[in-house]
Image (cartoon, rainbow, N blue to C red):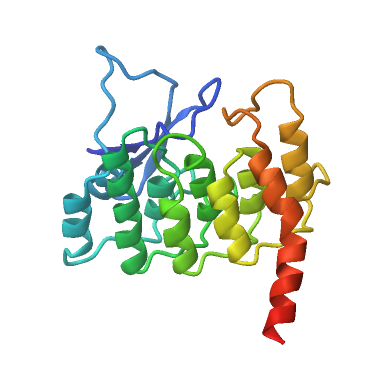
Amino acid sequence: MSHYYDFERARGPPPPVLCMTEDDSSVRCPVVEPGPDFPAPPLLPLPRALHNADVARVRELLAATPAPDLTQTDKLGQTPLVVAVRRSERDADRAAARAECVRLLLAAGADANVADGSGDPPLALAVMAGADGAMGTRCVEALLAAGADVNARCYLFKNSALHWAAASSNAAAARLLLDAKAELTRRNREKRTPLEEAEHCASAPLPHALGRAPDADVVRLLQAEPERRRQANLAAR
């Protein structure tokens, strides 16, 4: 029996381990940290290849007959696309490979708008993953090109991808989202617009929860955007 063991979601105290079998039956296991006495169960082929950013293996699996079901989710509600986009990378070559895996999934028909079981859309996850390390905007660009909803919001925090770019000081992602006409006035659970979220994080005395030091670049981008759009509309007349 092989299992799909998900390590990517854990933040703080881990939830019960959720395992998926080949025949899609599932069981809830006790929380046990992987280690020498308890090696992690092997991932299923496509999630394993995505976890490893193995472009050649992902390409091979997507070309197989029958092709893998890209709508199938694990017990956390993660499609293969979500598994691919939510992981950050420190190494530039790995980041480029991960982005290529995402492009392959999208080209094979993966839906760019299916959220995970917590209600987090792929675009928001890609913005968060690209806020630090080497991922940058690679996956954000791929998702937008595939028709990802730029204004889709997370279920819990009601953040759009632009809110997450503001909260993570991800100016490059914010620029892409603004170019894609992300809404400027939509409010999150804290009743803050993306600009207000950026201002809140920029004024924080300590680096915020996503691990980036506050950065004024996103604040300046969001402050300037209404006038930029006004000028663009005038020029288009």
Q: Quadrant location of the N terminus? A: top left
Who's the residue at 74% across and 21% down the image?
Answer: 205
Q: Is residue 96 left or right of residue 208?
A: left
Percent position of residue 104, x then y: 29, 61
Q: Nearer the viewer, residue 123 or 30?
A: 123
Where 1 falls versus 50 (above or below)? above
Is 205 displayed left or right of 94 in the figure? right
Residue in the foreground of this view, choosing between 22 and 112: 112
Question: At 72% from the left edge and 34% from the top edge, which residue is drawn?
Answer: 201
Q: Residue furthest top?
A: 37
- Camera sees residue 158: no
Q: Position of residue 99 (x, y in %)?
A: 34, 51
Q: Please give the name of the residue rendered at 16% of the width and 52% of the height, measured from the top-left corner.
A: 56
Quadrant housing the C terminus: bottom right
Residue 117 in the image, given as x and y percentages of width and height: 54, 48
* Vertical relation: 11 (above or below) 234: above
The residue that appears at 20% across and 66% down in the rendered structure is 66
